[in-house]
Amino acid sequence: MRLLDLIARAEPHLPVMLERDLHRLPGAGAFAPSVASCPLRLVLSEPLTALCAALAYADGDRLTGCLDLVHVPARRLWVEWPDAPRADAAAVHAGSAPSPPGGTAGAYLETDASGRCGTLRTFWCGPGPRDEAQLAPLATEFDLDGAWTLAAEACDVYGGGVVRLASEDPALAQLLDCARFRFDPAWAAYYRRACPDSASREDVLRRSLASVGTDLPLLLALFLLMNSRAGLPQRPVSRARLNQRRRDRAPLLDHVEVFAPAGCVASGTGGAPAGGRRPVRLHHVRGHLVRRGSVVHWRVAHLRGRATFGRVHTRTLTLRAPDLVSVPPSPAGLAGGHRAGHSVAAQGVSP
């Protein structure tokens, strides 16, 4: 079952006992009406998720160089994706071991008219058939133009302030600087009581950030690909006939499945290219973004060169990335459930 359908049937509140007091914290079901009434719901394929993650985390110039062209395609939007490709790409970029097999993650976004400023809430569920939808306690606020206002004194993140993330990778740091993270007020009040000392609060904050910290770059890569000239293959999925047989059960939600561009373009067999360069051996070129002014093209994977000059059958690449602070995954209950963590570093708070 899709994550958006799990949210539709989830409980709106998560009851938690603390010092004999019952706290009713917001659960995934609190956003069920918003997701159900969302005018656009996207479900990404696994290859497309891997492609977006590669654009987001590896050689960030491919995304940061086009950041001015990125716009969220709707004022209210739901996006969900298989989380394993995202977690693997983030682990490779951070130089750490791949995460255990993940389930599904999703984001509900609300933006202004420009599509460049708004908020998103992160959800996920495990890979098991009985796993329920989880809501992250942190909300992500993003501004692609970076028009953040800072007060003179920093405000405690558990008192309504925000925190930002930093990275030693300049490209990833530029993407992360578009986002600020703020605790849901009910979760902040709960953590103020549950974590009285600074060490435990710091631990909760790091674990919470690990669950949501670098999802925004993946979404930005998706929106850039959707706005490219070729766009992305899409297939609308209607649940009307299936819902007629479900009777009194919660209806399944219509959505649009989005796939990675596919295809292979054969290379030409002409003479030497312009500029006097010798023709190259026949080799594979992976799909990549090409920017021409204000227009972005997606160039599909293809073969380039001449077979008469030989063939490049394999190629070994050595990838290196700066070490980042490794953040463990958040435990169930304490930080809104379990999700494979990212490698991120918190860099201070501001109101």
Image: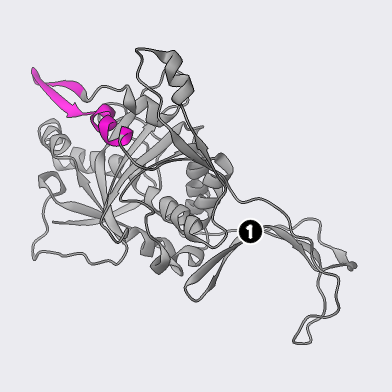
Examine the structure image and report whether residue 16 is included in the region drawn in magenta.
yes
- Res 143 quadrant in image: bottom left
The answer to whether residue 195 is above or below residue 198 is above
Q: From the viewer's perspective, is 149 left or right of 258?
A: left
User: In this view of the protein, which residue sits in the foreground, 2 or 90?
Assistant: 2
Q: Residue at x 58, y 44 (%)?
A: 47
Task: Tell me residue 188's x, y (percent).
Answer: 14, 38
Task: Give the image location of residue 327, x and y in percent.
Answer: 36, 44
Q: Which residue is at 36% across, 31% downward?
A: 338
In screen coordinates, is 205 left or right of 241?
A: left
- Quadrant in the rendering for residue 168: bottom left
Give, as a single range, the part of the protein colored magenta: 14-36
Quadrant (top left/top right/bottom left/bottom right) for the C terminus: bottom left
Residue 43 in the image, given as x and y percentages of width and height: 47, 39
Q: Nearer the viewer, residue 26 or 73?
A: 73
The residue pinned by badge 1 equals: 287
Which residue is at 52% across, 61% downward?
A: 228
